[in-house]
Image (cartoon, rainbow, N blue to C red):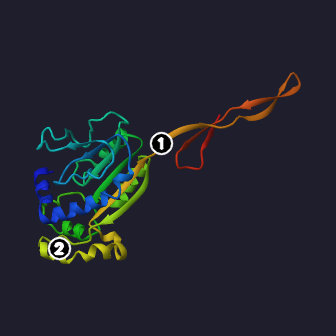
Amino acid sequence: MDQRALRAWFETPLGRSLQTHELHRLRSVLPNLYGTLAAQLGRLGPLDLLDAGVVPTRVWVETSGEHPGAGVLAVPEALPFATGTVDLLLLPHTLDYCDDPHQVLREVNRVLSPEGHVVVIGFNPWSWWGFRRLFTRRPRPAPWCGRFLPLARIKDWLQLLDFDLTQGGMLYYRPPIRRESLMERLRFLDKAGDRWWPMTAAVYLLVAKKRVVGMTPLRPVWKLVSTNGRAAPEAATRVTLWRRGSRRGKAVG
C-alpha cells in the first residue's frame, strides 16, 4: 500500500472535507472514553483526530516511516505495546489499508486494557464511494486501493474477539466529487442522509469495549449427608464462570 499516495489524497479538497467530518464526529465520541493512554494506528491526513480526547497521554503508530520521531514506528499487525496497557485505540481507516485486518483486531484485543475501547473508522462499500471503487481500473489509485470492508464483517470480528459494541454511526453522504464548488452545493445531503438513507454513507464509525471475563463465587448450597447415621449439613461450593453483560453463567463444582 502506497502510504505516501494515500496521505497526498487526504490533503486534497475531497480528502480534507472527509476527514473534517470524521474529526467532527469524533468530538462527540472521544470525550466519553477515559483512561491514561490512547493510541492512533496510522495518520493519513493532516488533522489530529485524537485532539478531542480526554486521555492525557496520546501517541500514534507511524506505519510508513515518513515522519521519524513523530510517532512509534511499527506495523498495526504487531503493535509495540505490552498486553493490557492501552485504554483507547483509534483506527482511522487502518483496516481499509492494512495487510491483515483480522490480525490487527487481534492485536487491538491484546494491547487493550480491561474495558478499554477501540474506535474504528472505515469506508462503506455499499455507498457511492464503494461503487466508485468497483468501477475504478486496476491498479486502483488512492483512496480506491483500500479494502472497503463491510460494517457487518467488522462487527462480527469484534464480537468473536469478545468486544461489546457500544455505539456507532454513519457520516458523509456526498458522492466523491473533486469540484469544491459542487461539493459545497451538496452539503444538504449530510443532513438528509442521516434521516432518509443512513446506510449509504461513505464512512462508518464504530465504538467497541473490550469485554472482561471473570469469576464470581456463589453462596454455598447446603445439602444433608450422613455422618454416623446422623444427618449433617455440608456446603457444596460452586463457582460461576460468566462474561460481563451475560445474565447466564455456567456452574462448576
Q: Earlier in the sequence, mark 2 or mark 1?
A: 2
Determine whether the residue tagged by mark 1 lies in a helix, strand or loop. Answer: loop
Q: Position of residue 65 (x, y in %)?
A: 13, 42
Looking at the image, is mark 2 or mark 1 nearer the viewer?
2
Q: Quadrant of residue 16?
A: bottom left
Q: Position of residue 158 (x, y in %)?
A: 39, 51
Q: Quadrant of residue 57?
A: top left
Q: Which mark is residue 232?
A: none
Residue 129 horizontal side relative to residue 34, left or right: left
Question: Which residue: 27% across, 38% down?
Answer: 79
Determine whether the residue tagged by mark 2 lies in a helix, strand or loop. Answer: helix
Residue bearing mark 1: 212
Residue bearing mark 2: 183
Q: Amino acid at mark 2?
A: Met
Residue 168 horizontal side relative to residue 57, left or right: right
Task: Tally the numbered discs.
Answer: 2
Q: Position of residue 7 (x, y in %)?
A: 13, 54
Q: Position of residue 224 (x, y in %)?
A: 81, 32
Residue 138 horizontal side relative to residue 105, left or right: left
Rendered view: 61 above or below 94: above
Rendered view: 153 above or below 68: below
Question: Which residue: 39% across, 56% down?
Answer: 155
Q: Toward the viewer: 52 or 78?
A: 52
